[in-house]
Image (spheres, coloured by chain):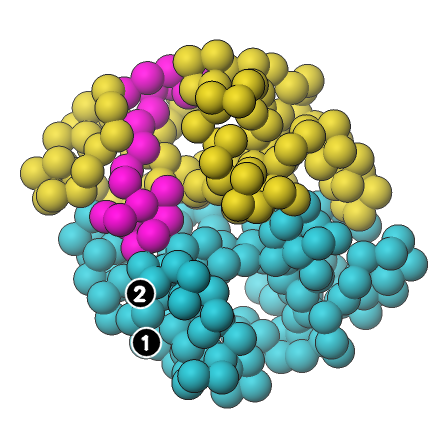
Chain colours: A cyan, B yellow
Amino acid sequence: MKLGCLNHVGVATPSIEQSLELYRTLFSAEPHGAPFDLPAQGVRVCFIDTPNSQIELIEPLGPDSPIAKFLEKNPLGGQHHICFEVPDIHAARAEFEAKGARVLGEPRLGAHGTLVFFVHPKDMGGMLTEIMEAPAH
Amino acid sequence: MKLGCLNHVGVATPSIEQSLELYRTLFSAEPHGAPFDLPAQGVRVCFIDTPNSQIELIEPLGPDSPIAKFLEKNPLGGQHHICFEVPDIHAARAEFEAKGARVLGEPRLGAHGTLVFFVHPKDMGGMLTEIMEAPAH
């Protein structure tokens, strides 16, 4: 497997609205579409385009959200994960597992409508890593 | 100012060699050139290319390195900063300061040979942010 595009950096925030205001003020950046809920992942998300990649703002959907603990430790928010594209999610998963990297759960539908999985930070140099099947475009 | 390219994600590591081994094993990724020291920033760095961006592995040059504290808290390493390009570093600095974002120190030579500065994480949603004059290429 080759290192694919850096699809996005996931940035946790206590408030997508406040973060959007920040990106608007400092970078004249507008969101790529309105924020939307991803209940299966317990987060509300909103993307901001850079010319070559994206920032994914993620806000907890409730107190049990998987990013709630991160925000307890980092109340202002911060970099939460990084996402690389692969051509085939199932092949990628098999390859990661064969190489001893712990894959967290079954591939599931991600924010871009393709399947994703996460790799345990302990097997990726401390970095929570999302692996995402590249969208068809 | 418009949001420029996501030039790289800065990933702190206790050992660039170990991280390179990890990227080699999991992603068949090779470094973009050999690691090199950036004494002015107290770090040793090495880039890994993705098709659209880069990962900047950063290892402390000594116990006083600005990333030493980060590694104390995150012994395995992890996402340390994010870097966006701007066309003009001095104009960007003036604009950030005019908008109340704290710029950390004078622009200085970065790992890509152009001037960079950092913005205080408290003014960037908890995310240490490097602003880099885009290379001429």
Amino acid of disc 2 = Pro
Amino acid of disc 1 = Ala
* Place of residue A132 in the rendered image (x, y in percent of width and height, measured from the top left): 65, 64
Please report contact status of discs 1 and 2: CB closer than 8 Å, yes or no: yes
Side of A110 relative to A115 (left or right): left
Q: At x 48% / y 23%, what residue is drawn? A: B65
Q: Residue furthest left?
A: B98
Neighbourhood count class around disc 1 (C-alpha, 10 Å): few under 14, some 14–19, many 20 upward: few
> Tag on residue A129?
none
Marks 1 and 2 belong to one chain: yes
Kindly tell me whether residue A45 is visible in this rendering. no
Q: For residue B124: magenta?
A: yes
Side of B19 relative to A30 (left or right): right
Q: At x 10% / y 44%, what residue is drawn? A: B99
Q: Which residue is mark 2?
A: A31
Q: Which residue is mark 1?
A: A34
Callout 2: SS: loop
In the displayed structure, would residue A71 be above or below residue B129? below
In the displayed structure, would residue A124 be above or below residue B59? below
Q: For residue B9: magenta?
A: no
* Place of residue B55 in the rendered image (x, y in percent of width and height, measured from the top left): 58, 38
